[in-house]
Amino acid sequence: MDYFAYVLRNGVGRSYIGVSSDPVRRLAQHNAGESTWTARNRPWVLEWSSRPLPLGAARSLENQLKAQKGGAGLATLLRDFGS
């Protein structure tokens, strides 16, 4: 099964980075309040998702994205690992 690292963004510029086998379905869950952290900051839009990856690679990419803390390195990773 393929997985995707994804980045969500809300109207005030907050971001959320996660992994899912179906980022569009997962976005709907975030916007429905099914995730504790994202429920308070709705609505979210899917800003970016990676190309299909094995689960381990998607988790590794998720951790790399989170380590950037939204800096310039994040934009580089998003460009390099885009779908």
Image (spheres, helix red, strand yellow):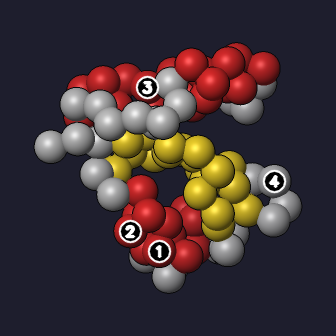
**Image quadrant occupied by the N terminus:** top left
Q: Nearer the viewer, mark 4 or mark 2?
A: 2
Which element carries disc 3, helix, strand or loop? helix
Which callout, 4 or 2, points at the residue further toward the start of the chain? 4
Query: Residue beneath label 1, please?
Result: 28
Mark nearer the viewer, 4 or 1: 1
Q: Position of residue 36 (x, y in %)?
A: 49, 68
State how far apart marks 4 and 2 are (Cα): 21 Å
Residue marked by disc 4: 13
75 and 34: which one is in front? 75
| Mark 1 residue type | Ala
Residue 61's label in the rendered image is: 3
In the displayed structure, 34 sits above or below 23; it is below
**Residue 36 seen:** no
Q: Nearer the viewer, residue 73 or 41?
A: 73
Q: CA distance from mark 3 to mark 2?
A: 20 Å
Residue 40 screen position, x and y as percent: 65, 73
Q: Tell me which amino acid carries mark 4.
A: Gly
Q: Secondary structure at mark 4?
A: loop
Q: Are marks 3 and 2 in contact (CB under 8 Å)?
A: no
Element carrying mark 1:
helix
Q: Nearer the viewer, residue 2 or 37?
A: 2
- SS at circle 2: helix
Q: Which residue is mark 2?
A: 25
Q: Are marks 1 and 2 in contact (CB under 8 Å)?
A: yes
